[in-house]
Image (cartoon, rainbow, N blue to C red):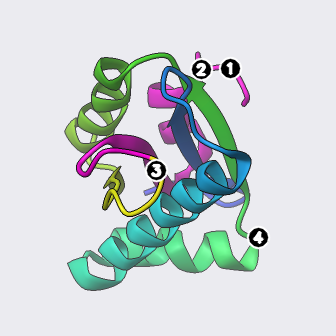
């Protein structure tokens, strides 16, 4: 449990080693963000639900960062889960620009910023 004045955010990591149009990239970021929120809602986890409420009250801070490979993207997702944070991983349906199943983005949080930073703090902004 985090103390008063705690900041909350969601960070979405996106692969830069695959070619996506700006619109495709934006859609993948949106998919990751929405899936992470739905995961929290569906989980029934009271701590995650509290984090979601606080994040909404604070304006739903989102940060988009880049990863350079599928391996790095998978690490972000797995490390977030290992730390007990809500995390989603997007695999593209393959209807437009990418082959089906291409992993494109991962969202960490919404959760306390200091916890999210343990996973994503070293990644550069997109």
- Circles 1 and 3: CB distance less than 8 Å? no
The span from disc 2 to disc 3 (Cα, nearest Å) is: 13 Å
- Residue 44 visible in the shown view: no
Membership of 112 in magenta stretch:
yes
Q: Earlier in the sequence, mark 3 or mark 4?
A: 4
Membership of 42 in magenta stretch:
no
Rendering coords of residue 107 (x, y %): 46, 50
The span from disc 4 to disc 2 (Cα, nearest Å) is: 23 Å
Label 2: which secondary element: loop
Number of the front mark, 4 or 2: 2
Residue at 57 percent of width and 64 percent of height: 30
The span from disc 1 to disc 2 (Cα, nearest Å) is: 4 Å
Q: Which label was assigned to residue 113?
A: none
Rendering coords of residue 67 (x, y %): 51, 22
Residue beneath disc 2:
123
Residue beneath disc 3:
107
The span from disc 4 to disc 1 (Cα, nearest Å) is: 23 Å
Q: Nearer the viewer, residue 100 or 65?
A: 100
Q: Earlier in the sequence, mark 4 or mark 2?
A: 4
Q: Quadrant of residue 75?
A: top left
- Residue 99 visible in the shown view: yes
- Circles 4 and 1: CB distance less than 8 Å? no
Residue at 20 percent of width and 37 percent of height: 82
Q: Nearer the viewer, residue 53 or 103?
A: 103
Rendering coords of residue 77 (x, y %): 31, 38
Number of the front mark, 3 or 4: 3
Write the start and end of the magenta stretch as one range.
Answer: 98-126
Residue beneath disc 1:
124
Q: Earlier in the sequence, mark 4 or mark 1?
A: 4
């Amino acid at each position: 449990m985090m103390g008063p004045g705690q900041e909350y955010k969601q960070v979405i990591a996106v692969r830069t080693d695959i070619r996506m149009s700006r619109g495709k990239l934006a859609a993948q970021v949106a998919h990751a963000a929405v899936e992470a929120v739905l995961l929290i809602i569906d989980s029934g986890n009271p701590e995650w639900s509290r984090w979601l409420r606080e994040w909404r009250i604070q304006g739903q801070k989102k940060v988009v960062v880049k990863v350079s490979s599928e391996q790095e993207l998978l690490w972000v997702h797995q490390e977030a889960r290992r730390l007990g944070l809500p995390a989603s991983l997007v695999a593209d349906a393959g209807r437009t620009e990418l082959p089906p199943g291409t992993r494109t983005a991962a969202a960490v949080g919404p959760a306390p910023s200091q916890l999210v930073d343990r996973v994503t703090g070293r990644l550069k902004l997109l």
